[in-house]
Image (cartoon, rainbow, N blue to C red):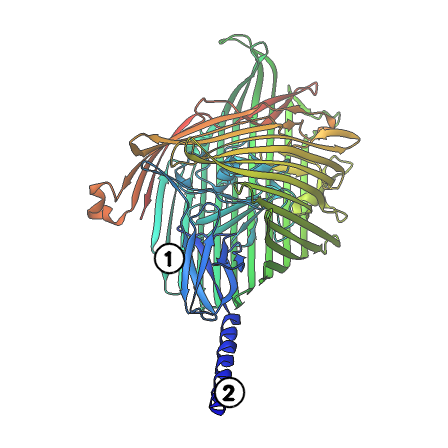
Amino acid sequence: MNGFKYKKMKFKAPLTLLFILFSLTLFSQRVKISGYVTDFDGQPLELVSIQESGLANLCLTNEKGFFSMEISAGDSCTLVFSCLGYNRIKRVIPSPKNGMQLSVTMRHSSVELGAVTVVAQHIQTNTTERIKIEKSRLQTDASGGNIEAIVVMQGTGVSSSNELSSQYSVRGGNYDENIVYVNGTEVFRPLLIRSGQQEGLSFINPDLTKEVRFSSGGFEPKYGDKMSSVLDIVYKRPENLEGSAMLSMTGASAYVGSASGKFTQITGVRFKKNAFLLGTLDTKGEYDPSFVDLQTYMTYMFSAKLSWDFFGNFSNNSYRFTPVNRSTSYGTVAEAKNFTVYFDGRENDNFQGLFGASGFTYRLSEKTNLSLKFSLFQSREEEAYDISGEYWLSDIVSEEEKSVIGTGKYHEHARNRLISDIFNVTHSASHQIDRHALRWALTWQRERTRDRIREWEMRDSSGYSLPRGDERVNVIQNLYSKQNLASNRLSAYFQDTYKFRIEAGLFSVTAGLRGSYWDFNRELILSPRASIGFIPSFDQRITLRFATGLYYQSPFYKEFRTVDTDGDRNSYIVLNRNIRSQRSLHFVLGGDYSFRAIGRPFKFTAETYYKKLDKLVPYTVDNVKVRYYGSNMAFGYATGLDLKLFGEFVPETDSWLNFSLMKAQQHFAGKNVPLPTDQRYNISLFFTDYFPRYERIRLNLRAIWSDGLPASAPGKGYEYGYFTTPSYRRIDIGMSYQFSADTDNFMRSGFFRYLKNIYLGLDCFNLFDINNVNSYYWVTDVNNIQYAVPNFLTGRQLSAKVLVEF
């Protein structure tokens, strides 16, 4: 018996040991799973926490909504997905397998208010904010619905004082200090543009736009060498057939998108002809602007790992103008004046642009992506005008009586041409290591510019040419240029984003270095940048962030042109090879607080900043034309506070209120003077509403009230004296009516059954017909006394539009 038992024990022991070892092996074995988390609009969700139920094993999604983690290889596993503002999701995975991929869609957490559903706000852990563009084509906008107009109203620290232009100023910077990306490629704007009337269509097509990100300072190393802001645009990749067409009194647009197997495309065409809006200007005549733009974005998936994309743009902006007369009354009640001009001649400008970008992206592994992209930008700009005028400057004695204080003639002539070609090759990559998101890129850029300028202006006051000469006739100013330039730029960056949780809360840290070399002036610049975001555990409605970095403004062509004058008073352009990059040291501290009031969601944002500026190239601004001194001659600073309240002032609508305070100063020529963009305050409001119980009728209001800008006499910088223009005040209001296939029976038959929505809109621009000053025309009398005659912007005007979606 003992022997039998002993043998039995010997038989059982190995079996028990084998079972224990098998169990330990089973529970210690790990499998890797990955996937993407999106919301119901298909947008990737960042900072989603994925935790293995009952264990401390967790990870976070990156900015693309991607996650990767190892879990236990048991019979089943439960993953818990949680994110601030979204309903928690539990996903049970039976028999997890190595390499398994998941796709998870999360719903906004919400509260029911009758028929109204309120959703949460986006969490921002760095200085790059998302700009909401839903229904942007229905918003009231004199420019025709530009993305830039939305950024001006919704972006932090952004201002614009010209409704005819898509250019904007950010925290004391000028238009040239803003960088714009479309699908990861930098885009450029024409250089000869003098006024908003010439500008035409902005580069970005709002019909094709899927996502808009904007940073007004302290941005990441992946963004290029500009001192003020970044506008990052991503175009749509359609999943089905879609499209729309719009017709208005300022132009028309249409687009169509489709997907077929591995191929997607979206193509849009725009036409703008805003002669009726220009007709409200003081200068009357035959306005004949014609702006056309064609864009396409295509993608093709060769395999699950290899993809190709192409983005193309052709634009032709033509501005023809034959002035007839002008009558401008200005001044105060005590000192009212009138400026009357009768013109002869015409202006004919043409700005033609061609842009193409194509690249390949290869997914080397779940955590590594490689990309190679090529882009080419070509610009052909021509500016030609011969305009003469006879003017009378008078004191207004009464409604019927005027007292002439000066008369004269002038003649302006220009034959200007500029050709620029920019070729770019970029290799970029991303790699995920645990909680580290690494990015790097290397870029080579070839630039060629051919500049031809021939322009002059003659003035005659009371029979004397100005400036007066005893032996010859002089012109008041002239400029000549014949320059050819070819140069190369090399740039690279590396950055790491690390996200982690501790008991105090969630941290997101981004740091990196950007470098650039330009062979024209043999300058190497290094730009370290860092930011940190924090969401405290005690209240996840609060987000805090701080960013700092050294930002350079790498010189572009017009920034290093200087003007020399010979003994015969002839001025000509020379290129400054000793030019250096302007520099700005940023400190940005801010935060968000998401809350509910009157049962609806709101978000309050506050940011304060200080920018230390040096190696500045001083400049003056006339309308939208920036004229640089061409040398590093100044230093200065910009500091301010930006506040924004965003939320549902009315249920199911987005509205926002911005308030900014700023001071921007520079020191040069031994004096402290304001920067040309020194706008002490800026208030903007966008408000939407609808008729109760009849939501298809919607109203929107757009209001701006901002401080005036410094101005100086022509040919003189601010160091010789300046004054401040009147404040910019403007209110636009619009109304739209919706026909929908879901609610209107006629939309389900005949031709209308192919349509999804029809919107009819009516807008009133400049509701109170306020005369806003954009620039000045300077009149000089025989005694060389100058008078500043304001150039007013557009007056009150009605406009109608029709938008059709299918």
In the image, is 342 to the left or to the right of 755? right
- Foreground residue among 425 and 274: 425
For badge 2, the amino acid type reads Lys
- Foreground residue among 540 and 376: 540
In the image, is 572 to the left or to the right of 86? right
Any part of residue 472 in sight: no
For badge 1, the amino acid type reads Glu
SS category of the residue bearing label 1: loop
Question: Mark 2 or 1 closer to N-term?
Answer: 2
Marker disc for residue 371: none
The image quadrant that residue 141 belongs to is top left
Q: Residue furthest front?
A: 1
Q: Nearer the viewer, mark 2 or mark 1?
A: 2
Location of mark 1 (residue): 239
Residue at x 60% of width, y 60% of height = 426
SS category of the residue bearing label 2: helix
Residue at x 45% of width, y 71% of height = 97
Q: Position of residue 405 (x, y in %)?
A: 61, 13
Q: Residues within 10 Å of mark 2 (few under 14, many from 20)?
A: few
- Foreground residue among 31 and 74: 74
In the image, is 576 to the left or to the right of 723? right
Location of mark 2 (residue): 10
Q: Residues within 10 Å of mark 1 (few under 14, many from 20)?
A: some
Q: Position of residue 541 (x, y in %)?
A: 52, 40
